Every structure is written in C-alpha cells, then in structure tokens.
Image (cartoon, rainbow, N blue to C red):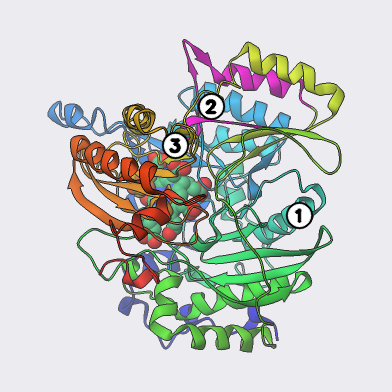
Amino acid sequence: MDARTQPDRSRDLSQPLDKLGPDETLKANSDYLRGTIKESLVDEVTAAVAASDAKLMKFFGIYQQDDRDVRDERRRQKLEAAFFFMTRVRLPGGVCSPSQWLKLDELARAYGGGTLRLTTRQTFQLHRVMKQNLCTVIQGLRDVLLDTKAACGDDTRGVMCTVNPSLSKLHRQVYALAKQASDHATHKTGAYSEIWYGAERQDTDGPEEPFYGRTYMPRKFKIGFAIPPSNDIDVYAQDLGFIAIARRGALKGFNVAIGGGLGRTDQAPKTYPRLASVIGYIDADKLLPTIDAVMSVQRDYGDRVDRSHARFKYTIDDKGLDWVKAEIERRLGRALAPAQAYAFTSNGDPLGWVRGEDGREHCTLFVQNGRVINTPDHPMMDGLRAIARVHKGMFRITPNQNLIISDIAPEDRPAIEALMREYGLDEFENRSGLRLNSLACVALPTCGLAMAESERYLPNLITKIESILDVHGLKDDPITIRMTGCPNGCARPYIAEIGLTGRAPGKYNLYLGGGFHGQRLNKMYLENVGEGAILQALDKTLGHYARDRRPGERFGDFVIRAGYVVEVKEGRYFND
Ligand code: SRM
Ligand code: SF4
C-alpha cells in the first residue's frame, strides 16, 4: 500500500477551510506557497514583506525578523522596525564541502552581518539579510548546490544525522539515507525556483504537491537518524526518529521512535515536552515507506485548528500510541518488528582528533553556541576560511553546534593542525566539562520570540558557574547545560542535566535532572529566578553531588536520587 495515496483530510472538501485555523486558509489559498512573495520582495516602501508572505517564506527557510536591540528606539523615532531576514540552509546531517563553506563564508561577509550561525539541527543560519539581497543569497547557495527549501515551515525541516565519523562505513550508509529522506520529504512546489531563481512556471503532469496537498503539514515535522552509542541528535526530541541497528559494522535497519517534541508555553499546561516512544523496528529498505506512513498519519490527523496543539506528540497522546502505531502499520501494509536492543552513552560531542575505520582523520572543534565570527582575539571565521581553502575532506556540523573538520588524509593533517593553531581554533582543552557540554539558542537580538538573553549570556553565566565547579573539584566533569531565551526549547533544554529557559529579561526557569544521553526529561526546580538564585541553587546541588555521588553517577541522576527533583517518567507529566 502506498501511503502517498492515502487519504489526506487537509484536502477533503467536506472539511470547510473556514472551520480550520487561519494558517490553514493561508496555505490552502497560497497557490502552493507562492502567495504574493514576488510582489513583496520588490516593494520598496518597506524593508518588510506582507504578513502573509512572511509566513509563507518560512517554508523556504526564510524568517522575517527585526533588530530587537534598536526596536524601542526606532519606535520612539516613529521609524519602522529594523527589518531583515534570517536564512536557514537545508543541510541534511550537517555535511558540507569546503567549496560550500567558502560560499557561505562569502555570503555571510557580504550580506549576513559577517557571521555564520551553526544551529542545533546541524545547519547554517545567516542573519540580517536585507530583503533586496535575499535572491542573491539564495542563488549564491544554488551555485554550490545548496538550498533553503523546507528549512522552516509546516513540513519536514532539516533532517538530522549522527556525525560520528569514526564509524566510517556505518555513518556513510546512514548519512546517505538521511539525505535521501530529506530529498524525499521536502516539498516539491515550483514556487521555490520561480521566486528565488526567477524561473518560469512549469506545467506539472500530476499534483504539484503529491504528498502534502495544498495545506502541507499541520505543523513542523522533524526527522532524525541516531547511530548508537551516540545520541548527539537527541533522537527522542524528534517527531520521527530512526535509531540505526548495525551488524558487524554495517547497517541492518532502524528502530522507529515517534512523537518527540520539546516546545511548550509557560502557564499553558496543555503544552508540554514529550520524548519519542520507540514503536518497533524496520529493515533499512523500508525507510521511505515508513516515513510516508508516519507523516501521512500526522498530515491527516494532526490538529489543524489550534496550532499550539498541532505537533505530532499531541496527535499521539490524543489518539493513543497504540492507535497511531496500528494506523502507521495499516498504511505501511505490515506490522513493525519488535524494537532491537541498542544503547546510548552520551548526547555530547567527543572533541579533538579521532581516526576513522577507513584511516582518515577527523577533528571536532568547540564552537561556543555555534557562533562563527571574528573577534579581535579569536579570528575563528578567518581560520575556518583558511582551512576551507586547503581542506580536501568535508565539514560536519554537529547537533551540539560544534564543527568537525573531517575526512583528512593522514598526510594532510599537519597543515590543518598548523592552521588550527595559528587561528586558535583548538583552544578548547582548558575549558570546563560544563562549557564543552553547553548549548544556547540564538534568542536576542534577532529572535522575535525571545523573552530573555541566551547566546549572549550563557558564556558569562558559565564563567560564574566554573568558579563553583572549581571549589567542588568538578571542572572536568562533563555536565550538560542548555539555555534558551523562551520556553520553545530550541537548544533542547528539557533534556539537559541543567536547563534554563527565559521568562523575562534576566529571569529564567531552572530545570534539573535530565538524562546525560537524552533519555529523560528534567523537572523545574526554580521558577522565574535571576542569576543570584541560579548560582546559589547550583552551588548547593553541585556541592552535594561532589560529596555524595556514587562512582560513575551523573549529575542528572544524582539530583533525582538526592530528592531535589522527582523523575519525569513520561513527557506528559512534565507539568505536574
Ligand atoms: Fe527553534 C521557533 C531558532 C531548533 C523549537 N526557532 C524558532 C525561531 C524560528 C523563532 C520564530 O519562530 O520566530 C527561532 C529563530 C531564532 C533566530 O534568530 O535565529 C528558532 N530553533 C532555532 C535554532 C536556530 C536554535 C539555535 O540556536 O540553534 C535551531 C534551528 C534548527 C534548524 O537548523 O532547523 C532551532 N527549535 C529547535 C529545536 C531543537 C531541535 O529541533 O532539535 C526545537 C525543539 C524541538 C521541537 O521542535 O519540539 C525548536 N523553535 C521551536 C519552537 C517550538 C515548537 C513547538 O512545538 O512548540 C518554535 C516556535 C514555533 O514553532 O512556534 C521555534
Ligand atoms: Fe527564540 Fe525561544 Fe527558540 Fe530561543 S528558544 S531561538 S528565544 S524561539
């Protein structure tokens, strides 16, 4: 049975669109995402685009934003906000070539404020792109075979894949499938080429969007591939996660996990983070039909009235996991096999050099919060450009916002190492285990949803926590800490051992007790508190941990055993 031909309730005329949410009407009436984007782009009266076009442009990886640092001042001066656009690249598995890196570097310097941002889903974001430069940027990306399709919007988003290059053969196999999955599930509308490349509209033989129809997905849908023992992609945070099962180093198939998602809203208990449930096993050749079957269930049954309740996790909890699994199996035309044994050990990145099974060398560099930028004492952007000019292998962005210079022939390593030393790219050895396991979302000044600082604040907060770690002798212990500027959870804070989510300027919720390899949600320990209270709480709990931990016990496990927080067994009890 082909799930692509299964019922799509979003196109069912018996469901009047006006009974659905406004975003559904917008999508349905947009002529497959064309809207009036072309007109908006040439409107010289404003640096912004029409509100409806701003929503549609997300499907093309482009977000309208404004500089929040100057928002109030501009309002006082009766000027429109300082609008610009964030452009997110589609980069399955985070792999890019040196020529792609050089192009991104060039575009970032010319149009993106002189900085590149590596994201928690392994891709690049350019911020501060002006409306009149968007086509140039997207055509520049096309020159190196990159695009921004479906990097945002109600579709599949960036497909993630574990980056561990030491398992060379297995990684190659899984990465190839992740790329195939991304190409398969990305929207097909001709609007992309027409708007961004200036192509003529082509007649299509069949439907323009054979899978999505006119209304696409009810909400974003995230797919990721994990290769145990690394859970770097946080597979339990994906709407649809695949856990690679290998035999003698070669891929056999995948355990299938569904219904992960972290977004929530403060004071709205109906929203909650949920970890994905493992529902069975498939052979590798059933991958694409499984993606179709799972996505089509969410496409047809996801909530199209209330967007805050439209992620797959809510469909699963409303309908019941057993019902959803049975519906997936019905569409797949077969039962899933029982899940196979696997074990994760960490969701962090091992930094520094490793040699792959194929003899090639790989070096993972620490990039604090994914920000690639030149500063007076740390010319990181120049350093990576210098490496890209001589590097014959690949770059891989990790889900922890770090960067691997990968696939280096042993004889080329000395030259790369010399450049790393010259530009100070390898200066991570003296950093604390906490800093090396930290993640922060972008937040202010570009994110329109931020309530507090994140990327610009976490490094300073960590410096203060490091003093506490020094006192307790924990400087080298790997402890995960993740901060976001609002509860949406873009740095996956709810599965960190220490999570901080912004409530207001200078105020955060503090969560403790997440699983070290992403297997357990944390629990709120303090609500809406400032730096003083955060440091006090961490001094107390970290000190207690240093004194009383059992051999090998992780901080996240300890705070539960010591009674600071209760264990969250299921995502839906997170808010209790
Ligand atoms: Fe996110 C919205 C940044 C990963 C959950 N996210 C946003 C927007 C686009 C704000 C907006 O809607 O106006 C942020 C742009 C900020 C900026 O200025 O760049 C934004 N999200 C990011 C990135 C760049 C964070 C980072 O610092 O790396 C990550 C880009 C990933 C990528 O390459 O595609 C990013 N976002 C995530 C993740 C983590 C993940 O997917 O592994 C999550 C939690 C997992 C999940 O989806 O449940 C996440 N972002 C959200 C949500 C909450 C969704 C929900 O179900 O409630 C929003 C808000 C929304 O969609 O309404 C959001
Ligand atoms: Fe913006 Fe909130 Fe996501 Fe941070 S978590 S990038 S503040 S939406």
Mark 1 Cα shell of 10 Å, populated few (<14), some (14-19), many (≥20): some
Q: State the mark number for residue 108.
A: 2
Tell whether label 3 touches label 1 (CB within 8 Å).
no
Task: Give the image location of residue 70, x and y in percent.
Answer: 24, 27
Q: State the mark number for residue 434.
A: 3
Q: Looking at the image, is mark 3 or mark 2 nearer the viewer?
A: 3
Tell whether label 2 touches label 3 (CB within 8 Å).
no
Q: Looking at the image, is mark 1 or mark 3 nearer the viewer?
A: 3
In the displayed structure image, the side of residue 236 where residue 457 appears, left or right:
left
Identify which amino acid the numbered label 3 is placed on: Leu
Task: Give the image location of residue 60, x and y in percent.
Answer: 52, 50
Q: Is residue 37 visible?
A: no
Residue numbers of the magenta segment: 364-391
Say if the magenta span includes residue 381.
yes
Residue 550 to residue 18: above or below: above
Task: Give the image location of residue 506, x and y in percent.
Answer: 20, 37
Sequence-first disc among 1 and 2:
2
Q: Quadrant of residue 284?
A: bottom right
- SS class of the residue under badge 1? helix
Q: Nearer the viewer, residue 543 or 63?
A: 543
Mark 2 Cα shell of 10 Å, populated few (<14), some (14-19), many (≥20): many
- SS class of the residue under badge 3? helix
- SS class of the residue under badge 2? helix
The residue lying at 62 percent from left, 71 percent from top is 256
The residue lying at 31 percent from left, 28 percent from top is 464
Q: Quadrant of residue 475?
A: top left
Task: Give the image location of residue 261, x and y in percent.
Answer: 44, 63
Q: State the mark number for residue 505.
A: none
Sequence-first disc among 3 and 2:
2
Residue at image mark 1: 176
